[in-house]
């Protein structure tokens, strides 16, 4: 496996939750890793000592070009971005500036410096309000419900057009619901106010937030609560290493869903957290969020056909147990 990851790899957002975990996967494979992160939401961890770390912005084309030249970068894994859906609605320019225009500047620098491979983190949020399908496949029409989803969709298109014109290879993953922490607890998510279900349920369990509000209990799902495809961050990170290695063998459109293809409801998540902790999770039902899909589960046909990647942690218990343990170990300390 090691021999296939040749040349230094630039990881943008490599101090963040997913980028950091991918840095660990790359380092575990013996790769030569360069990180660019402005630390706006990420934090430096001990393993970054084994990388060349630059604190700076992807929008700083001078700095990016300097890094690309100095390290003779051939591959970029681009994770840097903002991720809060609610904030993207109240402050869309923040998202279009950072996620779309920032990516445009980075992609331009990549083309000017003859970068060969560019992987981009997109999201299942591009699909929008899905109805009438059991699983979502990559050919489905996309209708993002918020500026966050649009900011990522625009970048997908930008990258595809530029790659086609300039011969840079691209790969795009649309992540489903990412959760969990590194199995050796070298890294995990840090969010003082979690925005996703599992983080919020943990806060409710620990009493550091009011009871969890469950958005809807009469949805068209087996138990009436929302169903999502949760994927362990460590498997997600490993998939990027596999994609770097596999890229050439994947035909034409290298855009892949990244999930397990298995759905769990909000009540499944709560039950699992209660079993792990031995304590009840306080919750209340509130109306469903407007436009939100009842069920979003990845169709993983393309992923499993094209990627030499076998998930190692594809069960809700491991995802939730590592999230809980990371939260308890770090206790809000960055
Ligand atoms: N977390 C999820 O559930 C999820 C789901 C789908 C897609 N994604 C995508 O995955 C990527 C990583 O998300 P995450 O959960 O790790 O978020 P994160 O906030 O933990 O990490 C983002 C990192 O990027 C850095 N950053 C932000 N803007 C930057 C800039 N302009 N220049 C340099 N660094 C910058 C931040 O400091 C942070 O370290 C994002 O692009 C996000 O849209 C995340
Ligand atoms: O306080 C909460 C939070 C969530 N949910 C429900 O839990 C499920 C998961 O919600 P959440 O964790 O907010 O994730 P999604 O809304 O599915 O969106 C996430 O997953 C996308 C990938 O599909 C990412 O791109 C987005 O950034 C991320 O918010 C949904 O059914 C929600 O209705 C609640 O009931 N209460």
Image (cartoon, helix red, strand yellow):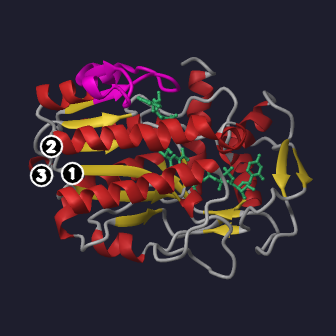
**Residue 221 magenta-highlighted:** no
Look at the numbered discs 2 and 1 and tell me whether their residues touch, using CB distance below 8 Å: yes
C-alpha span from label 3 to label 2: 13 Å
Crowd tier of the residue under label 2, counting other residues whose Cα lies within 10 Å: few below 14, some 14–19, many 20 or above = some
Question: Under tag 1, what secondary structure?
Answer: strand
Give the number of the disc on residue 4: 3
Q: Position of residue 48 (x, y in %)?
A: 31, 23
C-alpha span from label 3 to label 1: 13 Å
**Depth check, front residue: 70 or 304:** 70
Residue annotated with mark 2: 74
> Residue 113 lies in what quarter of the image?
top left
Magenta residue span: 35-63
Marks 3 and 1, the one that precedes in the sequence = 3
**Depth check, front residue: 42 or 264:** 42
Residue annotated with mark 1: 117
* Nearer mark to the viewer, of 3 and 1: 1
Residue at x-position 76% and y-position 31%: 206
Question: Under tag 3, what secondary structure?
Answer: helix
């Amino acid at each position: 496996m090691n021999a296939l990851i040749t040349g230094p790899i630039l990881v943008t957002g490599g101090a963040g939750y997913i980028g950091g975990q991918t840095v660990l996967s790359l380092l575990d494979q013996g790769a030569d890793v360069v990180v660019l992160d402005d630390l706006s939401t990420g934090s430096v961890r001990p393993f970054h000592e084994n990388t060349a770390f630059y604190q700076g912005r992807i929008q700083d084309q001078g700095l990016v070009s300097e890094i690309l030249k100095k390290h003779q970068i051939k591959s970029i894994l681009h994770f840097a971005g903002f991720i809060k859906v609610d904030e993207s609605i109240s402050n869309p320019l923040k998202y279009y500036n950072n996620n779309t225009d920032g990516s445009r500047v980075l992609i331009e620098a990549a083309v000017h410096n003859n970068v060969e491979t560019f992987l981009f983190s997109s999201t299942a949020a591009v699909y929008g309000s899905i109805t009438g399908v059991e699983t979502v496949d990559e050919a489905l029409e996309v209708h993002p419900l918020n500026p966050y989803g649009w900011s990522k969709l625009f970048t997908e298109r930008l990258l595809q057009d530029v790659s086609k014109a300039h011969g840079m290879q691209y790969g795009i993953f649309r992540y489903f619901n990412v959760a969990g922490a590194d199995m050796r607890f070298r890294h995990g998510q840090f969010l003082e106010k979690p925005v996703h279900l599992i983080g919020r349920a943990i806060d409710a369990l620990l009493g550091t937030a009011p009871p969890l509000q469950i958005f809807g209990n009469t949805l068209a799902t087996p138990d009436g609560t929302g169903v999502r495809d949760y994927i362990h961050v460590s498997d997600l990170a490993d998939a990027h290493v596999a994609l770097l290695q596999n890229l050439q063998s994947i035909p034409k459109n290298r855009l892949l869903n990244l999930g397990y293809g298995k759905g769990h409801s909000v009540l499944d998540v709560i039950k699992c957290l209660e079993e792990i902790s031995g304590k009840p999770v306080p919750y209340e039902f509130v109306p469903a969020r407007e436009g939100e899909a009842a069920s979003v589960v990845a169709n993983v046909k393309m992923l499993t056909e094209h990627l030499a990647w076998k998930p190692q942690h594809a069960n809700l218990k491991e995802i939730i147990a590592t999230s809980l343990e990371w939260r308890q170990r770090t206790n809000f300390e960055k």
